[in-house]
Image: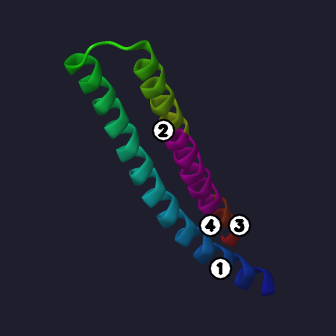
């Protein structure tokens, strides 16, 4: 009986974490999209400078990695919730 109480408490914690990770996915995705749009606009509207292209490319890569890591954490938390639900049955 004690294990069920621990699992239900852990399940509540995982659901809170899932909401927080979802918020992080939305935030990182917005920054990623903003970086892609600003890079495209800069390349279309300004004179091409190799230093600025490299700088914007690095930002896009960093925001992409941030988005993918946030998404992976969210998916891992969803799978942990499924696991705890299966263990409670």
- Residue matched to label 1: 8
Task: Give percent across and percent down for residue 61.
Answer: 51, 29
Please report contact status of discs 2 and 1: CB closer than 8 Å, yes or no.
no
Single out the residue that lies furthest toward the left: 45
Q: Is residue 49 left or right of residue 15?
A: left
Q: Which image quarter: residue 50?
A: top left
Q: Which image quarter: residue 72?
A: top right
Per the rendering, the mark at residue 87 is: 3
- Residue matched to label 2: 63
Task: Give percent across and percent down for residue 57.
Answer: 46, 24
Q: Is residue 17 left or right of residue 56?
A: right
Quarter of the image containing the C terminus?
A: bottom right
Residue segment shown in magenta: 66-82
Element under disc 4: helix
Q: Residue at x 47, y 33 (%)?
A: 59
Instruction: Tell me the CA gap for discs 4 and 3.
Output: 5 Å
């Amino acid at each position: 009986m004690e294990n069920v109480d621990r699992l239900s408490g852990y399940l509540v914690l995982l659901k809170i974490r899932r909401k927080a990770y979802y918020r992080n996915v939305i935030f990182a995705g917005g920054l990623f999209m903003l970086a892609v749009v600003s890079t495209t606009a800069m390349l279309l509207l300004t004179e091409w400078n190799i230093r600025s292209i490299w700088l914007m490319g690095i930002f896009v890569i960093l925001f992409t990695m941030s988005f993918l890591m946030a998404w992976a954490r969210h998916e891992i938390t969803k799978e942990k919730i499924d696991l705890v639900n299966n263990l409670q049955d």
